[in-house]
């Protein structure tokens, strides 16, 4: 959070300022790591990683917007206060709950994602001794009924 002084205030508005976009960025960086770990190490159903993203981001945004709640009550930001929360918090809470519901729904309704295959790293292994390699391809075997071409 940043503080401003009356001398640096814009239009007479001064007080504690929270960088909600920065908090979102940091939270999403952590979420990326979590999703990557889940992708590589967890058996999940189709759609569940998306549901984890929706739930995480919704609840994250709900918490981050507490930094704007006092400013919304004072009227220094454009977000309106509806009951105990801002409009953004109500929307984020709904998104978080929707993500949880999607996660449970996908668990029951969709199939499991097969584990990812390990990517080939580096050059492919050399062909075995009994396998033909690129320059010395084996001639295809003739089958009965093949007409030789001249």
Image (tube, helix red, strand yellow):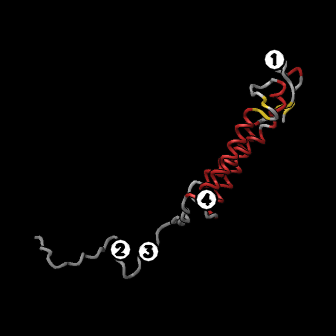
* Badge 4 element: helix
Q: Residues within 10 Å of mark 3 (few under 14, many from 20)?
A: few
The residue that mark 2 highlights is 133
Location of mark 3 (residue): 126
Q: Position of residue 98 (x, y in %)?
A: 66, 46
Q: Which numbered disc, 4 or 3, marks the residue closer to the eye?
A: 4
| In this view, 92 is above or below 78 | below
Q: Nearer the viewer, residue 15 or 115?
A: 115
How far across and down, in percent of the image, does residue 130 sit?
Answer: 37, 82
1 vs 2, front mark: 1
Residue furthest to the top in view is 11
Q: Earlier in the sequence, mark 2 or mark 4?
A: 4
Measure the alpha-carbon separation of dots 3 and 1. 72 Å
**Quick one: SS at disc 2?**
loop
Identify the residue position indicated by label 1 in the image. 11
Other residues around mark 2 within 10 Å, as few (<14) / some (14–19) / many (≥20): few
């Amino acid at each position: 959070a940043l503080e401003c002084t009356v001398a640096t205030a814009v239009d007479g508005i001064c007080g504690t300022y929270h960088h909600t976009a920065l908090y979102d960025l940091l939270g999403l960086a952590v979420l990326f790591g979590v999703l990557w770990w889940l992708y590589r190490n967890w058996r999940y159903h189709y759609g569940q990683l998306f549901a984890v993203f929706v739930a995480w981001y919704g609840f994250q945004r709900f918490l981050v917007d507490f930094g704007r709640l006092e400013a919304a009550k004072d009227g220094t930001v454009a977000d309106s206060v509806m009951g105990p929360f801002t409009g953004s918090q109500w929307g984020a809470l709904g998104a978080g709950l929707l993500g949880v519901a999607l996660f449970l729904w996908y668990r029951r309704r969709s199939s499991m994602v097969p584990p990812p295959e390990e990517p080939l790293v580096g050059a492919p292994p050399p062909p075995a001794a009994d396998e033909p390699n690129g320059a010395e391809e084996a001639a295809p075997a003739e089958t009965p009924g093949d007409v030789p071409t001249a």
